[in-house]
Image (cartoon, helix red, strand yellow):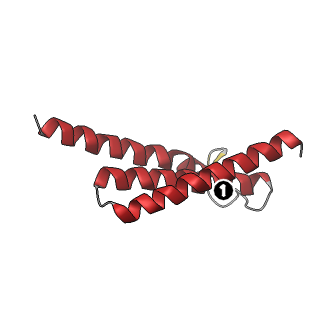
């Protein structure tokens, strides 16, 4: 493992941890559905980051569930943050269009 890979892994872990930490702090201060979905998306993104790093080190395997040649866990974890973000944006669009 080269220095570039180490910097990549450490930067993803540190920045993701900061984003997840502040998301959890925000979650405790707000009860707005759109913001809660954004928080869930940030936490899901960090979970995906941790899972992909564990996969790089060979700690977790992908043999349990697979959809073709793609692990079902990887497929879900990769797309889950975007699903939460889409839901949050949809809530905000619906909220803004109702006010008119």
Q: Residues within 10 Å of mark 1 (few under 14, many from 20)?
A: some
Q: What residue does disc 1 label?
A: 50
Residue 3, quarter of the rendered image: top right
Rendered location of residue 69, percent (x, y): 67, 44
Rendered location of residue 73, percent (x, y): 59, 55
Rendered location of residue 21, percent (x, y): 53, 59
Residue drawn where x is 49% and y is 49% of the image: 80
Residue drawn where x is 39% and y is 65% of the image: 28
Seen in the image, is 14 located left or right of residue 100?
Answer: right
Taking 33 as reference, is 82 above or below it?
Answer: above
Query: Disc 1 on helix, strand or loop?
Result: helix
Rendered location of residue 45, percent (x, y): 55, 50
Q: In front: 86, or 26?
A: 26
Residue extending farthest to the bottom is 28
Residue drawn where x is 63% and y is 49% of the image: 15
Q: In front: 16, or 67?
A: 16
Instruction: Mark yes or no: residue 71 visible.
Output: no
């Amino acid at each position: 493992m080269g220095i570039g890979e180490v910097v990549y892994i450490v930067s993803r872990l540190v920045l993701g941890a900061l984003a997840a930490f502040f998301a959890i702090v925000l979650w405790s201060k707000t009860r707005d559905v759109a913001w809660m979905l954004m928080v869930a998306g940030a936490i899901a993104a960090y979970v995906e980051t941790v899972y992909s790093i564990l996969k790089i080190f060979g700690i977790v395997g992908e043999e349990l569930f697979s959809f073709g040649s793609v692990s079902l866990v990887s497929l879900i974890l990769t797309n889950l943050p975007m699903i939460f973000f889409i839901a949050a944006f949809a809530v905000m669009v619906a909220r803004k269009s109702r006010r008119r």
